[in-house]
Image (spheres, rainbow, N blue to C red):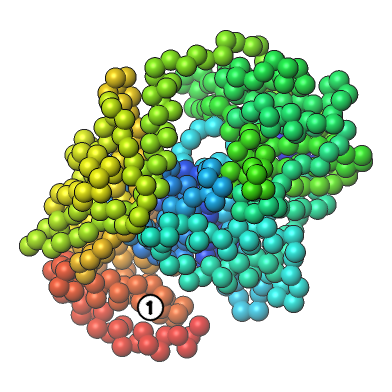
Amino acid sequence: MQPDPAFDPENRELYTAMMRAPDGYRFDHAVATTYSLDFETALAIPIAIVFRDAENRDEMLRSPLALLQSVERMAERIAIYCDRGRIKSANPNAARLMALYEKSIVEVSAPGGGAFHPKLWCLRFQPEKRGEPVRMRLAILSRNLTNDRCWDLALCLDGTVDYDEENGSNEPIARLLRALPGLANRSTRPTEPAFLRSLVRDLQHCWWSDLPAGATRISFAVNGLGTERWEPKKGERIAILSPFVSNEALKWLVDGYAEPGASQLIARPEELDCLNSSVRSLFQVQTLDSRATEFEEGDEEAADTGNLEGLHAKAYVVERGSRLHIHLGSANATVAALVPTKSGRTQNVEVMAELDGPKTRMGTIEQALFSEGFKRLLIPYEPSEAPTEDARLAAEKLLDRLRREIAAVPLDLNCNELGDLVGLEVSVAGAVPVVELPDGVACFLRPITVANLSGHDAAALFQARVPLAVGHLPLGDVTRWLGVRLHHQPTNMECSFTLGARLVDLPEGRDAAVLSAHIANAENFFRYLSLLLGSLGEGSFLEGEAAGEGQWLQRFGQGGSSLLEPMVRALNMGGDELREIDALLRRLDSPEGDGNIVPEEFRELWASFAPLLGSSKARR
């Protein structure tokens, strides 16, 4: 019996669902790679880990305390690597919270000069019961860490760690993870995450169970790090699913497929328009029907399942003898992703997974890829006029080139205490080529926590290395993130993105200042405690919110019994939540904090618990 079609659009996987720990396990650490990201989606990941059933990002973003707590607990256990210059611009409110998440996000570049383009998550889960094996999850994606609404693919694998035997097929992924810290700019490179080496070790000893799509084998490949690279094995028939395509890459992929109808191609129509007709003639060509993804206004059920737009999935399906090979991951059918340069490696860094099995289990190309549900989304391609190089398209290319050049410049954000404020000055941190701004192009820079979206003229910074003062901010608004805005005056086109700088001479207590800004009164303090203790069964922060403002404060006023019970439970379970409360109190009592936030009644209750924290480890 064949499994459900691997490419059926009804088989959906929520991004946040991949973060949920298996039953009997808890989240430990994770490493992720992405081409682009936005802060709101990045913040949704720690939220999803803390609140397993909370998948409504908009609702969470309206709860700053929930965001703050989840970021605080998870920031040191997650590392996210993305392509330089591909962090989207952010609103000031979301940006303030990123101060506590800024060490988790590292901008890197591809050694071959192209894009850092892999999309994966590698997660480790620890067992709740002693003696159970460590579990891991590996997700190979075509989706970036953004809120884009495109058709994407995800391969999610779960496995257990066996320290007695290595799984050699995982080595390409392990090699990619080991290389990540070294891909950051040498001048401002952060330290390697403390957990990275042990996570890679566990990955090398992890064996995957229950392969999807009827596959019996799985393997991985990474392009762009060395001369080893991925290419699909040749077979009798091939189907290519790729939003972006190029003539040379497609000819290379179908070389040897001479039979009529042996090669099929699904791509975006605007990309197909740019291909040579001789290349298109090598394929049966289809594209996504935009009408198939629309839903009738007011049809809420359809809006939940059908309002995706555009093709972003990448897959290569090959029939080879009696077996079917499904390759999926980040690589488009383009020269930068697939075709090696003179150095022997590709321009882009890409990651691919290959599922392999007999056609009796996996099916044929028609059965695996062209399911009835997927075929409904497709229409035959009808050629249109290739786009002409008009002024706006030329300006868009120019701004994107300048984005890449500016993103390659290492920056320091120098801090200078000025009373209650911190003066900020941006300077270039290393010896790199200057960025020449053509006539008619302006560049502006700003700390992303300020509402002044116009920014400060940064031409002298990038062209002459003249330090740029970017304002005076409260300590709680200081982050390493800078908003960059490029403006092409003749066409009035703009390109906005976020860059990370290295914080220099950051005053002590910045994290405490961020915390105090969101826990500004006694009521919020108790709401924060409810969140810390909510995972112990006393109801989550959102449940407290639904029950009415100030519920925890009111219940504490009734004798404190409602806080006493979960605190005792936390002590008996090891005291981790109580240690977080202890750290919170210490920070709020620091010179930079605001000890007045903590009510005296709670201090009296806490005096009974604080001496017991040192001995609570014995209860584990």
The number of callouts visible is: 1
Nearest to the observer: residue 262 or residue 101: 262
Q: Is residue 24 visible?
A: no
Mark 1 packing: few (<14 Cα in 10 Å), some, or many (20+)? Answer: few
Determine whether 449 is above or below 269 in the image: below
In this picture, is 542 found above or below 584?
above
Name the quadrant containing residue 47.
Answer: bottom left
Vertical comparison of 259 with 518: above or below: above
Horizontally, residue 568 falls left or right of residue 378, namely left
Which residue is painted at 66% across and 40% down in the image? 338
The answer to whether one can see residue 597 in this image is yes
Q: Secondary structure at mark 1?
A: helix
Q: Quadrant of residue 171?
A: bottom right
The residue at the point 22 percent across, 42 percent down is 460
Indicate the amino acid at tag 1.
Val
Where is residue 482 shown, x and y percent of the image? 29, 47
